[in-house]
Structure formats: structure tokens, C-alpha cells
Image (spheres, helix red, strand yellow):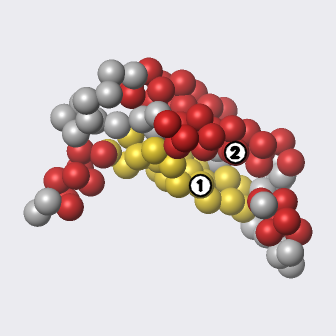
């Protein structure tokens, strides 16, 4: 899907990826997509907006582990990474 949409553009400048780093499909599939985008389009800018897990909001034990593995991939394969705190998002939504 990404390749088809990119080929339909006149002059793609880069890619933006929004993901959660706590686990599930956000951490694994998101970093895999980032790796594939970097392999196929190395000259394009990649920016990621990643929601970092918080232990006050979630009770899943493996979230910090998934976040550490994902952060490593973001540092290696992304040009810009914007980390958003999940606890801050939670407090904003409840106020």
C-alpha cells in the first residue's frame, strides 16, 4: 500500500508514522514499517510520532521492554522522532 501510494505522488518529500511503543501492533509492526520505508526510500525524510507507555496508565508488564526495543529501532531508522507521554495524554483527556 505504501509503495502504491508513493508511486502515485508527484514528488514525495517524506513519511510520517504514528505508533504506540507499548506493544501489540504499534511497536512491532510500526518499527518494521519504518525499517522497510528506510530500505526502499533512503533519501526521504521519516518522522515518527510515538506514544511512550506509562506504568500509571497501563498494567501490562512487558510495555517497558517493548518500548526499549522500539526506541532502538527509532534511533537507527528515523530522521525525526517525537515522543509523547501516555500519562500526559491520559491526564489531558480527563481534564
Secondary structure found at label 1: strand
Q: Is residue 93 left or right of residue 47?
A: left
Residue 29: image location, x then y, percent: 62, 40
Which badge, 1 or 2, comes first in the chain's sequence?
1
Residue at position x 55%, y 41% in the image: 25
Q: Which mark is residue 29?
A: none
Quarter of image, res 77: top right
Above or below residue 66? Residue 15 is: below
Q: Which mark is residue 33?
A: 2
Q: Is residue 83 left or right of residue 18?
A: left
Q: Which residue is mark 1?
A: 17
Above or below residue 37? Residue 94 is: below
Residue farthest to the left?
A: 95
Q: Quadrant of the N terminus?
A: bottom right
Q: Quadrant of the C terminus?
A: bottom left
Residue 82: image location, x then y, percent: 47, 50
Residue farthest to the bottom?
A: 10
Q: Is residue 20 left or right of residue 60?
A: right
Q: Is residue 17 something one can see in this rendering?
A: yes
Circle count: 2
| Circles 1 and 2: CB atoms closer than 8 Å | yes
Tell me if mark 1 has few (under 14), some (14-19) or many (20+) residues whose alpha carbon lies within 10 angstroms of its own.
some
Residue at position x 84%, y 60% in the image: 3
Residue at position x 59%, y 34% in the image: 28
Residue 67: image location, x then y, percent: 45, 30
Residue 58: image location, x then y, percent: 26, 35
Secondary structure found at label 2: helix
Tell me if mark 2 has few (under 14), some (14-19) or many (20+) residues whose alpha carbon lies within 10 angstroms of its own.
few
Quarter of image, res 52: top left
Amino acid at each position: 500500500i505504501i509503495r502504491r501510494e508513493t508511486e502515485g505522488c508527484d514528488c514525495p518529500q517524506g513519511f510520517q508514522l504514528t505508533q504506540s511503543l507499548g506493544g501489540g501492533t504499534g511497536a512491532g509492526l510500526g518499527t518494521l514499517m519504518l525499517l522497510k520505508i528506510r530500505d526502499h526510500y533512503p533519501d526521504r525524510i521519516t518522522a515518527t510520532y510515538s506514544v511512550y507507555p506509562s506504568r500509571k496508565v497501563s498494567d501490562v508488564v512487558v510495555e517497558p521492554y517493548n518500548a526499549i526495543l522500539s526506541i532502538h529501532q527509532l534511533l537507527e531508522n528515523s530522521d525525526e522522532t517525537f515522543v509523547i507521554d501516555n500519562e500526559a495524554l491520559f491526564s489531558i483527556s480527563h481534564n
